[in-house]
Image (cartoon, rainbow, N blue to C red):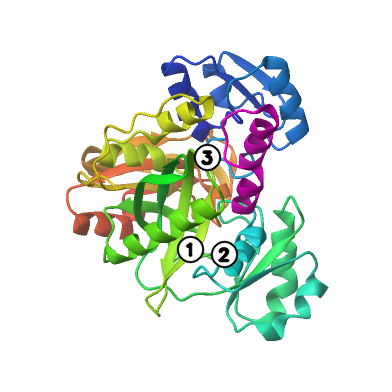
Amino acid sequence: MLGGSLYQTYAIKEAVRLGYYVITCDYLPENPGHKFAHEYHNVSTTDKEAVLELAKKLNVDGVVAYASDPAAPTAAYVCEKLGLPTSPYKSVEILSNKDLFRDFLQRNHFTCPKAKGYTTYEEALKDIDEYRLPVMVKPVDSSGSKGINKLTDWGQLKDFVDDALHYSRRKCFLIEEFIVKKGHQISGDAFSVNGKLVFHCLGNEFYDPNCDKDFAPLGECWPFEMDHKYIEDLEQQLQRLMTLLNMKSNAYNVEAIVGEDDKVYLLELGARSGGSLIPQVTECATGVNMVTWVVQAAAGDPIDLSILNERKEMPIKGCWSNYMVHPTETGKYEGTWFDEEFKKKHLVDFVTDTKEGEEVHKFRGAQDCTGELILKYDTPQQMMQVIRDMDKYVKVRVK
């Protein structure tokens, strides 16, 4: 298991529950997931050669990069070298790098934003006449909205390029056409078995309009609130993409939007499960435990799809959301306050490892999250109302 962070602990525990001998590795021995594994090794999850040597030495049967964009190519690389179950390394690399992904989508005539990758500010400056403002500036290989900015004036370009490069391991960034969306952004997880899309649970992504970066997501909610024709369109795009990339048995994190032109634009297909407790909320909402499938697929064991009906999605039972708990100011963390009635009616789980006295930053993106909630609701209307007014029910106390 590549990584032992708080949000990877669920997969580690699931693998142990299923009876596998579980070994974790990363460069953070204090990460909480390691104590649930049988072994831990201090090896960076992005060091492909070091992980390969470790996997050889330990004679492993499979490698999982759960909810981790940076580790997904490592897992595919190691498995391909050792002949273990995996989707192709080159395909996972394409899905894990925004410049490669956009280029692949454009060359294969998918509906996607116009975009191009660059390595320097000067290189990008030469191309500004090709874009119409606003545009998005993004690191090609980060996650959680880190280093992403919406550019409305070319005078902002240098600062935004510097920010993107700070968060890019490859030191490369993307300038991307800004698509004005209709309704909610589409977000959720999907799974393929032997290259066939067998399941997805796609919902509505929501944001904090009071945040400096109003495009940084705070969570997702289900059931889907827009016309189902958009999901059907997206299903076809996902299957075509999986076929072209020769994907095998794999979990995916999906991001898409519907433009004002009524077209569905595919933004992301991460070759890993979603973070922010998305698989756990999916299980609450549908009864489908995709984490079990992730572990079984990595080991090359049979995946039991008997819970599924003839469709690629299961009916959502009730109304559900996750939510990134976050500070509205910078300072020292003092704790998280919950309205008692809110806790009783809506709170299913609160996952956090933020400690009292720890420095926290006013929310800019996932890196400033101090915890995650799983919430349930009685009706879609109640769900949307509670999400809009969340600051009345949950507050991060900062000194």
Q: Nearer the viewer, residue 206 or 98?
A: 98
Residue type pointed to by label 3 = Ala
Camera-side residue of 134 and 393: 134
Does 334 sit above or below residue 203?
A: above
Query: Mark 1 or 3 closer to N-term?
Result: 3
Total count of labels: 3
**SS class of the residue under badge 2?**
helix
Report the side of 186 relative to 248 (left or right). Answer: left
> In 3D space, how far apart are the residues under numbered discs 1 and 2 (Cα atoms)?
9 Å
**Sequence-first tag of 2 and 3:** 3
Earlier-in-chain disc, 1 versus 2: 2
Q: Quadrant of residue 191?
A: top left
Residue type, label 2 = Leu
Assign the magenta stretch its main secondary structure: helix
Q: Which residues are magenta?
A: 72-96
- Name the mark on residue 165: none
Residue under label 3: 67
- What residue sits right under mark 2 in the picture? 105
Would residue 308 appear left or right of 26 to someone viewing this image? Answer: left
